[in-house]
Image (tube, grey):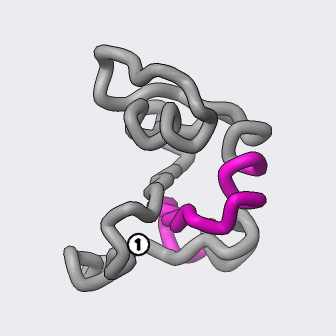
Amino acid sequence: MDLVVHTALLAAALGTAASAEPFQLVSLDDVEHMLSAKDVAIYDANPEEVFKKNHLPGARFVDGTFGAGSLPADKATRLVFYCANPH
């Protein structure tokens, strides 16, 4: 499975230069590395029944009420959103 994450945030997490693309696919290994740093918030945008059956540890469900107030107060927190849809 690949996940889409903002490249500037990923670059900061991995200590590399940011890509010109604002988002990119990242591997689960990349996300695991980010989780070990404990400054990442993970959001699952799958349908609720999929989320309830299986989701990444610590992932929060993105529902119809999701908005800016659902994001971490610390703007330095890296954000990872994922779902089964390849787009």
Range of residues picked out in magenta:
32-49
Residue shown at the point (28%, 78%) measured from the top left: 66
- Residue 74 x, y percent position in the rendering: 36, 75
Is 1 on the left-hand or right-hand side of 8?
A: right
Q: Residue furthest top?
A: 20
Q: Quadrant of residue 73?
A: bottom left
Rendered position, 49 above or below 26: below
Residue shown at the point (34%, 75%) measured from the top left: 71
Rendered position, 23 above or below 54: above
Q: Residue furthest left?
A: 68
Rendered position, 21 above or below 79: above
- Residue 75 x, y percent position in the rendering: 31, 66
Q: Secondary structure at mark 1?
A: loop
Residue shown at the point (59%, 32%) measured from the top left: 15
Residue shown at the point (57%, 65%) measured from the top left: 39
Q: In which quadrant of the rendered image does the N terminus lie?
A: top right
Q: In which quadrant of the rendered image does the C terminus lie?
A: top left
Nearest to the observer: residue 30 or residue 17: 17
Q: Residue furthest front?
A: 15
Q: Quadrant of residue 27?
A: top right
Rendered position, 41 above or below 66: above
Is 66 on the left-hand or right-hand side of 42?
A: left
- Let me know if residue 55 is in the magenta part: no
Where does label 1 land, which residue?
Answer: 62
- Let me know if residue 41 is in the magenta part: yes
- Residue 6 x, y percent position in the rendering: 39, 38
- Residue 11 x, y percent position in the rendering: 50, 32
Nearest to the observer: residue 59 or residue 71: 71
